[in-house]
Amino acid sequence: MVEEPRECDVAIIGAGIAGLCAALTLTQAGLNVVIVDKARGVGGRMATRRLGGAVIDHGAQFFTVRGEAFDAIVSDALQHGAVAPWCSGFARAAAADQPAAPADDGHPRYRGATGMTDLPKFLAERLGGTGTSLRTTSRVTAIAIADGRVRLGLDGGAGFVARGCVVTPPVPQALDLFAAGGLLAPAGGRIDTDTHRLLASVAYDPCFALMLVLDRPSLVPPPGGVQFESGPIGWLADNQQKGISPVPALTVHASGEFSRARFDDPPDEVMQALRVAAAPWIGDATVVEQSLQRWKFALPTVVLNVPFVAATTVPPLVCCGDAFAGPKVEGAARSGMAAGRWLAGVLNPA
Ligand SMILES: Cc1cc2nc3c(=O)[nH]c(=O)nc-3n(C[C@H](O)[C@H](O)[C@H](O)COP(=O)(O)OP(=O)(O)OC[C@H]3O[C@@H](n4cnc5c(N)ncnc54)[C@H](O)[C@@H]3O)c2cc1C
């Protein structure tokens, strides 16, 4: 028997912060929501993993709060112990082989209580009570339109038919899904060329994240993070000082320039180069375990100055995430909420 696609009001692709914030907004409007993510868990680029005995954030490191809507979400998470303040500024250095000076600007930086995935997990729990269905380990293969509704093709599944859809993967990946569903010209052309061109202008830097578990404390100064202005490393954090790892463990983020230039190099060579650059902060410690993550679309370098883009309006198909409404965690959250409000207005007209 052929399995029928499941029907819902809104299908959301991606359980990162943008997708989860869109879902919260849409469920508050009484809509029936399904979230689909190819990963095993929620969070997307807010990513934490265990390596040996260590707990390491290897994607986003911290977040700030500037707007009221995100403040309400973070205050709720703070009250329930899902997030914690980390500090109000990190040490800065000209390069990884130069001394670092403290830089405190008084503005709070937050972390997840036990890792950066805690905030997305908290939001997923909040959604649990709303009837929202969350499907992880489910890769969307194509976004199409038929009979006035959005159809999502799913790897190894029947997929979904929805009245509207929120698309949160990095924009180049979203465009691949539109192309696979025949929505881009010349195939079907449901997405007009101006909108296509606008979305195609978004660009990202890649980022290598090297994770190092150490046998004794690192030389990273308090509060456990250093930002570098030039050289192969852009950022370095001590996850034990940060308060999430029981043992000393570093996250080393390569700079955009290094990550672009070395993106296709053998991982062992990249690890070696980053370890050499990070040596002044490792000091006498021995590296007992290491791992390298390669983020292809890490940080947007060309963002759109709009909170979201409606790729089509009938049916409503909306792109959002950190390439809209300002980059970083808060920008992605704000974009998700804005996309959710717009979609709720289209599907539930007053
Ligand atoms: C190395 C690094 C360091 C960073 N540091 C910081 C920082 O310190 N502070 C800060 O504020 N921000 C930081 N950021 C940026 C921050 O992580 C992002 O801005 C934010 O998490 C983006 O959220 P999002 O929901 O828009 O996208 P994502 O988190 O990328 O979510 C998109 C989701 O879509 C899913 N997906 C993609 N394709 C498919 C498919 N075909 N089918 C199903 N699911 C799919 C993915 O699995 C993912 O879960 C960093 C990012 C990286 C990579």
Image (spheres, rainbow, N blue to C red):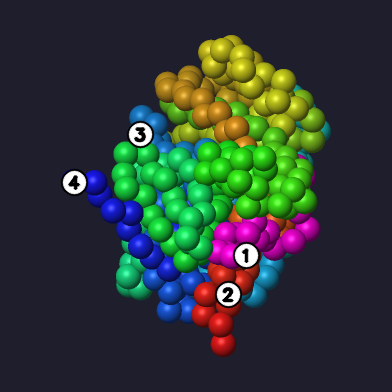
SS state under label 3: loop
| Foreground: disc 1 or disc 3 | 1
Task: Give amino acid for label 3.
Answer: Gly
Q: Between residues 331 and 268, which one lies in front from this camera angle?
A: 331
Q: Which mark, by number, is residue 53?
A: 3
**Residue 253 position by quadrant:** top right
Please report whichever mark, 1 or 3, sits nearer to the chain's N-terminal start: 3
Classify 10 Å Cα crowding around label 2: few (below 14), some (14-19), many (20 and above).
Answer: some
Image quarter of residue 175: top right
- Inter-mark Cα distance, 1 to 3: 49 Å
16, above or below 172, in the image? below
Residue at image coords 53%, 39%: 180
Is residue 250 visible in the rendered image? The answer is yes
Direction from residue 275 to residue 36 in the image, left or right: left
Q: Return the residue at label 4.
A: 1
Q: Can residue 316 be found in the magenta stretch?
A: yes
Q: Mark 4 to mark 1: distance in Å?
A: 34 Å
Q: Nearer the viewer, mark 4 or mark 2?
A: 4
Q: Position of residue 165 (x, y in %)?
A: 51, 60
Q: Is residue 339 magenta?
A: no
The residue segment tinted magenta is 300-318
